[in-house]
Amino acid sequence: MKKITLAVLLTTFIGVLQFVKAQNIAHINSLELLSLMPEKKAADDQLKTLADQKKSEIKKQEEDFTAKYEKIQKDLQSKSQADLEKMKSQLQKYEEDFQKDQQSLAALRETAAKELEQKQDNLYAPITKKAQEAINAVAKEKGYIYIFDTAQPTLLYAEGPNILNDVKTKLGLK
């Protein structure tokens, strides 16, 4: 009888312990939180401005190259075959220039992409740090042990408390 009573008490204790542990788990969608932060919106605006500027620079260079080579093609069309034979070295130079211009354009695109990525990293770092600090503060205040990010595709089930509203309050967001 003592063994049965002990087994029931032990089972009950383990069940209560698991219930208490389950209450220390919460979830939040970090992407939703970040989208609500005014700092993120301002950073996105800065990134859009920079991206538009880079697109404009690339487009202008593309247009310059296109105009340059259309003019060369037009000039060459008016030449006779004999004249083209005489211009063989000049034609080879045009081809070399064309390849250099293509490489220059590719380098401009690559530089623009790297610059945008670096700017994004620089702008988002303090924002994500602020959000993480608020999440940490709410977790400590509420006594959560684990908080899952539902923005990550690894979470399949989320019935625990969502602390988004608490974190928004901590950040002074609506």
Image (cartoon, rainbow, N blue to C red):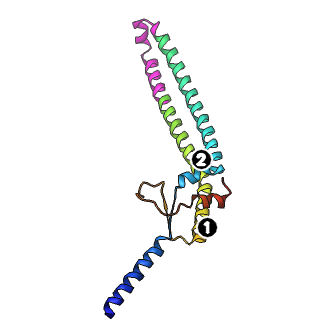
Residue range of the region highlighted in magenta in the rendering: 77-100
Tell me where residue 50 sits by quadrant.
top right
Badge 1: residue crowd in 10 Å (few <14, some 14–19, many ≥20): some
Amino acid type of disc 2? Lys
Under circle 2, the secondary element is helix
Looking at marks 2 and 1 on the same chain, the residue that comes earlier in the sequence is marked by 2
Tell me where residue 127 sits by quadrant.
bottom right
Tell me where residue 137 sits by quadrant.
bottom right
Q: Residue furthest bottom?
A: 2
Residue 84 highlighted magenta (yes or no): yes
- In the rendered image, residue 60, in percent from the top left (x then y), is placed at 58, 27
Q: Which mark is drawn over residue 31?
A: none
Seen from the viewer's position, the closer of residues 83 and 139 is: 139
Q: Residue furthest front?
A: 1
Q: Residue at x 58, y 35 (%)?
A: 54
Q: Residue at x 42, y 58 (%)?
A: 155
Q: CA distance from mark 2 to mark 1?
A: 28 Å
Q: Is residue 106 left or right of residue 14?
A: right
Q: Which callout, 2 or 1, points to the residue nearer the camera?
A: 1
Q: Is residue 58 above or below residue 18?
A: above
Q: Is residue 129 above or below residue 103?
A: below
**Residue that label 2 marks:** 119
**Residue that label 1 marks:** 137
Residue 170 highlighted magenta (yes or no): no
Seen from the viewer's position, the closer of residues 31 and 93 is: 31
Amino acid type of disc 1? Ala
Seen from the viewer's position, the closer of residues 96 and 31 is: 31
- In the rendered image, residue 36, in percent from the top left (x then y), is placed at 61, 50
> Main structural element of the magenta stretch: helix, strand or loop?
helix
Q: Are dots 2 and 1 in contact, CB under 8 Å?
A: no
